[in-house]
Structures are given as C-alpha cells and as structure tokens.
C-alpha cells in the first residue's frame, strides 16, 4: 500500500468529497485533511447531491455497478446511513414502451443482473402485469412491460449529506473551509506538479495532494473536453393532500426508460417528478486550465437558481397524464435544473490526473453516484493507496476522449429525450412564449 501525502486538500462537499473525507478520517487519521467548499453551507442547496430524494437501486445493465450497488444498498438498509427516514425501501418499477428496443434491452439485462444478485425482482411482461404490481399508477400508463424490484428504495438526499457531514465532524479529523477555487496552483519548477489552489479572493491554499470532487463544475478547473460534460436535468415538485400522500407513499418509484421520467413516492405532501435524459447543455467560455497563453474554451457549466424551461414542463405534463393523470394539471410548487457530470459511458472518474502530479479526480457521477455514498469514499481511498481492484481501476480510469462536438451525455442505454438542448435558448423560448411563472 502506497503511503498517502500528509497534507490533503479535498475540493467539493458533495457525495464524492464528503465520502472521501469520511474514509480518510477513519483510515488515515494522521493525515491533515482540509475540505474546501464554495457554498457557505453543507448541504449545498445548489449541489447535485442535495434534493428531496435519490433512487437507491442495484438495477443496472452493467454487472459491476449492479454488484457494487448491492453492497451500498446493504449499508443503506442495515446501518445508520438509512436510519431516521434517510432510506425507504419502496421498490422500483422499470418500464419500457412498445417498440423501444434500447429501453427493453436495458431493462431485461438489469432484471437478470438483480435476479442473479438475489434481489426480490419480478418480471412484468405485459401492461396488465405492471398495473397489478403498482395499481396506484393509472390505466392510461403507456407501457409494454417491465419489472419491479422490491429490494430497491430511495434516500432522502439532503438528509444523507447532513448525516455524512455530522459523521465527519464527530471524527474531528477534517478541517472545513469555505471558498471557491478559481484555478489550480502549479510548481514553478515544472508547471506539472499541483501544489494547491487559488481562491476567488486571490488567497491560496497549499497541499501535497489536491482531490477535485467538484462535480459539474470540474470542467472549469481541468480540461475535460470529450471526457465529461455537465448536463442540466429537469425536476419539479407538486404539493399533494394528506389523502393523496397516504395513497401514494408506498408505491414503487417508477422509471420509464423511454422518456427518462421518474416519479419517487411523496414525503411530507410533496411529490417529485424528474427526468434522466441527455438534458440541457450550458456552454460558457472559460480559460483553458493550465494554459499560460490566455486561451479560452467553451464548456458546459451549471446555471444556478433557474426554473425549468417550458420544454421540460411539457414533458412532465405528458408523463403525468400517462402515469398519474390526477396530477396532470396540478401546479408545480417549485422546479429546478440539477446537474449531472456525464462521462461517455457513465463510468466515474476516480484516478490521478494523467499529466499533472499531486492531482486526483473523484467525479463523473453521470447521474447515478448518490447510491454509492456509503462506499465511494472507500473506493477513492483504495485508489489513492493503490489497492483498488483492477476491474474498478480500469472502469474509473481517465476516460478516452470522444468527439466533444457530438458528446451529448452518457450513452449507457438509460438516457432518453432530445439531444442538443441549450439551457439558455430553452429559457429564452419559455420567456417568449409568455409563460410568466409555472409556480
Ligand atoms: C436530478 C438528479 C437526479 C439524480 N438521481 C440519482 C438517483 O436517483 N440515484 C443516484 O444514485 N444518483 C442520482 N443522481 C446523481 C448523484 O446525485 C450525483 O452523481 C452525485 O450527487 C454527484 O456528487 P458530486 O460530489 O460529484 O457533486 P456535488 O454534490 O455537486 O458536489 C460538488 C461540490 O463541489 C463544490 N465546488 C464545485 N466547484 C468548486 C470550486 N471551484 N471551489 C470550491 N467548491 C467547488 C460545489 O459547490 C458542490 O457542493 C442524480 C443527480 C441529479 C442532478
């Protein structure tokens, strides 16, 4: 096992950063670990890890993620991670419509993977079978078949982040600092060794190792063109009555692979609908990281605090008509664009930077990393120690670049929706259409 550098700086206080900090606290208590977060609070309300809910499932078409997810789910089920309402095991219903062979193929592989792992899953070859498994969804449900996995569940995402932060505070080994990194600092000797970071107020923090766990913002700090792209995903929330809460709270989460739309059962009279899709790009001109010649590049970066475009609202209205018609015209009390850090195949990036020493990346969540919160930090620390198994090391290595002009988002068979949507263009169309507010 390789010894770790003494002075470690983690940038980012979401799933990747917090889980790594927790693991370092336990396994390397003598390291000096600082966690730097731009948001004044952890949980960061604009971070990808913070929301009402996240699906916890082993339902993957890729057997390695399926297996890893069963390990993580086991911790959500059996340990403090899932206590106090942080984890609810309500089941997951994966459905596909007629004529969509990609969605059917993902669903079928995923079903076989979870069955092999011993999960409580049942294949539902017809629409009638789907409706029998989840009668809360209406007769208008437009599906050809699917399966339900009663071993899957969902987590209260914000509560999970709060829990991890509390655990780290209790360990007392990590220093938390608020500040936003503008760029990495390099050694003057070789311009290839990262020695720390510069913040917006021009102060610097030095470290022997910098771990970037900066999610969808990472593209502004290292050149990830063709390797990771930040995509904005639509979410909306609906207020429901006490009676409706009782009717819906125990239904399985539904995920329709044809549209990417999913609905997680409500809590506290709030129902969430979201879309797992190619999403919106938001290109911004930023300096090319590490370039001394003042070059700029265009990369997609998060836009904070915007409501969803009309395009997203219309998709939700259509899906509600098919899935829960009673709510099709119900006003949204809030909407949000939440950011994925998509890699070409949906594999995380947990690896040293190939060109800069003392720089490590822990990112590339690709819309599916939350469930791994209880274990991902251990995998990061395994990678730092050089003890990560060969399969995960290969899967999470620096990705091969794809053509950045045709890179819309992860292509793992689970994504749907239109490609090429630009967030600001869609918001401008929304304003032009005269929609004053959807709230
Ligand atoms: C809508 C949506 C639904 C999802 N659903 C699921 C699901 O059902 N199941 C599942 O498993 N996963 C799901 N995910 C994916 C999962 O939530 C993410 O993969 C995971 O939370 C990403 O964590 P992160 O640490 O990379 O990012 P974040 O939580 O965004 O953390 C990154 C942090 O870095 C900070 N930061 C960034 N740049 C800087 C800087 N320059 N200086 C200082 N700090 C900085 C940010 O402020 C932020 O707090 C979903 C994601 C979204 C958006």
Image: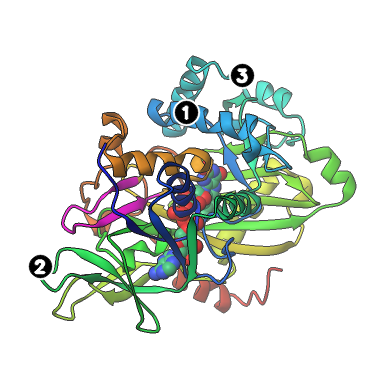
Q: Residue 342 appears at what percent x and percent y?
A: 38, 51
Quarter location, residue 172 = bottom right
Give the side of residue 60 with respect to residue 144, left or right: left
Query: Quick one: 70 or 27, which is closer to the camera?
Result: 27
Give residue 52's mark: none
Mark toward the viewer: 2 or 1: 2
* Residue that carries the numbered disc 3 in the rendered image: 120
CB under 8 Å between discs 2 and 3: no
Q: How is the image coloured?
A: rainbow
Give the side of residue 74 with respect to residue 83, left or right: left
Q: Is residue 149 above or below residue 192?
A: above
* SS for dot 3: loop
Residue 352 falls inside the magenta stretch: yes
Q: Residue 241 appears at what percent x and percent y?
A: 87, 51
Would residue 108 be visible to someone looking at this image?
yes
* Residue that carries the numbered disc 2 in the rendered image: 190
At horizontal 67% and vertical 21% (from top left) the residue drawn is 129
Give the side of residue 315 with respect to residue 264, left or right: left
* SS for dot 2: loop
Earlier residue among tags 3 and 1: 1
Earlier residue among tags 2 and 1: 1
Would residue 259 be visible to someone looking at this image?
no
Q: Residue furthest right?
A: 243
At horizontal 27% and vertical 64% (from top left) the residue drawn is 222
Earlier residue among tags 2 and 3: 3
Q: Which residues are drawn in magenta? A: 349-364
Q: Residue 291 appears at what percent x and percent y?
A: 17, 73
């Amino acid at each position: 096992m390789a010894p770790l550098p003494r002075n470690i700086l983690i940038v980012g206080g979401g799933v990747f950063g917090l889980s790594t900090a927790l693991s370092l606290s336990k396994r390397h208590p003598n390291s000096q670990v600082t966690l730097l977060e731009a948001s004044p609070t952890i949980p960061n309300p604009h971070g990808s890890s913070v929301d009402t809910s996240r699906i916890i499932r082993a339902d993957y078409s890729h057997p390695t993620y399926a297996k890893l997810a069963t390990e993580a789910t086991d911790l959500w089920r059996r340990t403090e991670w899932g206590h106090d309402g942080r984890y609810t095991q309500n089941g997951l219903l994966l459905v596909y419509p007629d004529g969509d062979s990609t969605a059917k193929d993902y669903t079928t592989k995923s079903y076989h993977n979870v069955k092999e792992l011993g999960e409580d899953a049942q294949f539902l070859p017809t629409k009638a079978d789907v409706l029998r498994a989840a009668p809360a969804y209406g007769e208008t449900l437009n599906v050809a078949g699917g399966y339900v996995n009663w071993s899957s569940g969902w987590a209260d995402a914000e509560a999970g982040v709060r829990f991890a932060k509390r655990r780290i505070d209790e360990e007392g080994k990590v220093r938390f600092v608020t500040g936003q990194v503008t760029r990495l600092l390099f050694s003057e000797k070789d311009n290839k060794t990262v020695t720390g970071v510069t913040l917006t107020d021009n102060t610097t923090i030095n470290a022997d190792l910098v771990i970037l766990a900066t999610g969808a913002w990472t593209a502004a700090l290292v050149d990830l063109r063709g390797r990771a792209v930040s995509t904005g995903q639509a979410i909306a929330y609906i207020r429901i009555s006490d009676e409706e809460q009782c009717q819906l709270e125990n239904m399985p989460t539904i995920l329709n692979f044809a549209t990417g739309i999913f609905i997680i059962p409500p809590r506290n009279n709030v129902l969430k609908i979201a879309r797992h899709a190619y999403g919106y790009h938001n290109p911004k001109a930023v300096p090319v990281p590490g370039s001394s010649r003042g070059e700029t590049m265009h990369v997609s970066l998060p836009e904070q605090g915007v409501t969803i475009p009309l395009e997203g609202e219309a998709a939700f209205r259509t899906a509600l008509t098919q899935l829960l018609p009673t709510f099709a015209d119900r006003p949204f009390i809030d909407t949000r664009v939440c950011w994925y850090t998509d890699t070409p195949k949906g594999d995380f990036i947990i690896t040293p930077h190939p060109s800069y020493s003392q720089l490590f990346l822990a990112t590339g969540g690709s819309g599916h990393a939350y469930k791994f919160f209880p274990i991902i930090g251990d995998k990061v620390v395994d990678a730092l120690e050089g003890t990560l198994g060969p399969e995960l090391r290969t899967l999470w290595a620096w990705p091969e670049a794809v053509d950045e002009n045709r890179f819309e988002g992860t292509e793992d068979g689970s994504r749907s929706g239109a490609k090429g949507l630009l967030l600001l263009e869609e918001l401008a169309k929304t304003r032009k259409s005269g929609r004053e507010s959807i709230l």
